[in-house]
Image: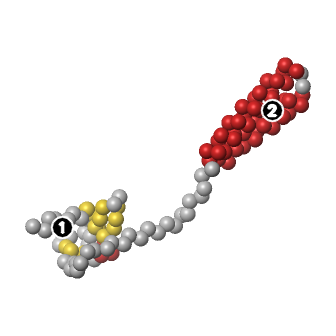
Amino acid sequence: MKIIAYIAAAICIFFGVLFIWSAFGAASAGNIVIGIITVGIGFGLIFFASRRPAKASDENVTLKIDMPGNVNMDTLKCKSCGGTLAPENITMVAGAPVVTCPYCHTTYQLTEEPKW
């Protein structure tokens, strides 16, 4: 829809300028008024096409992970202080799981070690 508005604005501005130029050759005041109105409509279309819609301030992103087969979760311990970590301490940042220790407040990325 924005592309159509920009094209229509360009056409309005082009023909508006042509009307204004033609007024100087034929000395017609009517062409100047029509040209100014048409150019104004063109700039109005550009203004409304360039406005961005308001974003919702509260966005909830839910990440659901489907694990194949039976998965047993081992107890996670902090690498710095050895405190027990709960699933609430794990967040997704830029697509990577990041854990924050509630005891020593150390933040680090979780890495999966090979199974062999």
In x, y percent, where is residue 30?
89, 31
Mark 1 to mark 2 CA distance (whole Å): 72 Å
Residue 99, position as x, y percentages in the image: 28, 67
Q: Amino acid under label 1?
A: Lys
Observer able to see residue 83: no
Q: Secondary structure at mark 2?
A: helix
Name the amino acid, label 2: Gly
Residue found 88% across the figure and 21% down from its top: 26
Locate residue 54: give its quadrant: bottom right
Q: Secondary structure at mark 1?
A: loop
Q: Residues within 10 Å of mark 2 (few under 14, many from 20)?
A: many
Is residue 3 positioned above or below 70 on the image?
A: above
Tags 1 and 2 touching, CB below 8 Å: no
Left or right: residue 25 versus residue 57 is: right
Q: Earlier in the sequence, mark 1 or mark 2?
A: 2
Question: Given the current orientation, which residue lies at the most extreme top position?
Answer: 25
Instruction: Give the tally of numbered discs.
Output: 2
Name which quarter of the figure residue 16 lies in.
Answer: top right
Q: Residue 109: x percent and y percent?
A: 25, 62
Q: Residues within 10 Å of mark 1 (few under 14, many from 20)?
A: few
Answer left or right for 47 relative to 62.
right
Q: Compared with residue 12, is residue 104 higher up or lower down, i.e. above or below?
A: below
Q: Is residue 98 above or below residue 13?
A: below
Is residue 81 in view from this perspective?
yes
- Pick the front one: 54 or 88: 54
Tag in front: 1 or 2: 2
Residue at the (35%, 58%) spot, across then down: 94
> Which residue matches tag 2?
35
On residue 79, which mark appears? 1
Quadrant of res 57: bottom right
Q: Is residue 70 above or below residue 2?
A: below
Q: Residue placed at 90% from the left, 25% from the top? A: 28
